[in-house]
Image: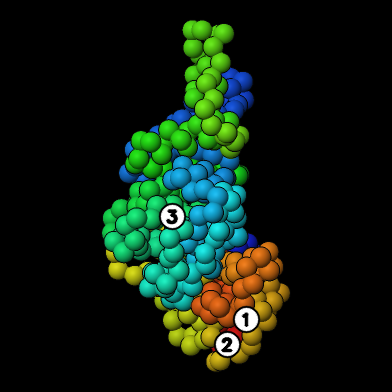
Amino acid sequence: MEKRSIAIGLPSMGIEEWEACKGPIESGWITQGPKVKEFETNFALRHNVKHAFAVSNCTTALHLGLLACGVKEGDEVIVPAFTWVSTANAVKYCGAKPIFVDIDINTFNIDVDKIEEKITDKTTAIIPVHLFGLCSDIDLIRTRFPKLKIVEDGACAAGSALHGKPAGSLGDVGCFSFHPRKSVTTGEGGMLTTNDDEIAVKIDRLRNHGASISEEQRHHGPKPYILSAFEMVGYNYRMTDIQGAIGVIQLAKLDKFIDERDKWAQYYKEQLKDIPWLRTPETPNGYKHGWQSYVTYIDESCAPMKRNDIMEFLQQRGISTRPGTHAVHMLDVYAKMYGIKPQDFPNAFNADQYSMSIPMHNKMVKEDFDYIIDAIKTLS
Ligand SMILES: Cc1ncc(COP(=O)(O)O)c(C=O)c1O
């Protein structure tokens, strides 16, 4: 078989995104403006929430989400031990302490049964992560911990759902990423969602230096001498209108992208089901998976070689793979800061060592999937 080159993820953009950039460029309104507003309105509609606010990326979304929920210095915030580092970093930005909780090795999401033992009188919030596009069980978290503010890390979960409710509508605040590894992208970019009017006002101001009115409102207002009021220390976490314009087009393609990915996820599962050392992802009943990534798990006790050797083998055949993500408690910064050992969170440790993400994006064709499946099968 002829060698192919298959990326782990690729953005799917076309002439529509290209054309959409012209509007802001030609009008000269390129910072947060009408296209960002349109993107927010459409995103809120699609995710069934009252408010959506676009920001510069999901890390800044998490920061603002926590601040808007009142997280402050000295607080403790529950985070899963297996996630992208920025879930924990955002807690640190608020002066709070991330409290790691192990994951369920089958879903890669936080193990809800292990949360209780980590709650103290300083715990004010939790960030359940919808890892790789599979929602965390927010309903159960809400029932068990009604006092905690819930900030969903839905970086990977645009379009995902739990019992028919979209990601971003499940907690107090939802946070999304539009990095190119996500199913819809604006280059860099993020979105916050909420149904809470007070939280909404805070987010809107915090992302724009703490200003009570936006530049656009000021620009179009009748009184040029009036500057915004500033009642809080804010940030410049705005999204540009060029990104907003791209986001409008990408969002309109979201459901098509997820449907395609879902079809190929079934295909991978069916084709790889007889490989005893490779566990493919499960979608529990009641969940709609967004398939940001397709993350498998290698059982090294019966695999023909170690996970890293399998990844190298596939790389030599032009197939990109990655560990699913990392065990944040094992990263130097957090391991040293809090004296945490790898085995303190054994499932996160195992996921870090044995997970393998294989290519999944909307530019792949059947020949790509067959090529990958064939390469994995030659190992068996
Ligand atoms: C789970 C999770 N949270 C947060 C982020 C941060 O997103 P961004 O790169 O948009 O800041 C990512 C990015 O990959 C992620 O996977």
If you read the primary sequence from the N terminus, does the residue marked by circle 1 or circle 3 appear first?
Answer: 3
Mark 2 → mark 1, Cα distance in angstroms: 7 Å
Q: Residue at x 51, y 7 (%)?
A: 223
Q: Nearer the viewer, residue 134 or 143?
A: 143
Whether disc 1's CB lies below 8 Å from ligand 1 is answered no
Mark 1: amino acid: Arg
Q: Position of residue 314 (x, y in %)?
A: 65, 75
Disc 2 + disc 1, Cβ < 8 Å:
yes
Q: Nearer the viewer, residue 219 or 5?
A: 219
What is the spatial separation of the Cα atoms under label 1 and label 3, in whole angstroms?
A: 38 Å
Residue type, label 3:
Thr
Which residue carries the number 3 mark? 124
Can you tell which of label 1 and label 3 is closer to the viewer? 3
Q: What number is the disc on residue 307?
A: 1
Q: Residue at x 43, y 65 (%)?
A: 119
**Residue 309 place in picture, x, y as percent:** 68, 81
* Neighbour tally class for label 1: few under 14, some 14-19, many 20 plus, Cα within 10 Å: some
Residue position for label 2:
300
Q: Amino acid at mark 2?
A: Glu
Look at the image and tell me whether residue 117 can be seen.
yes
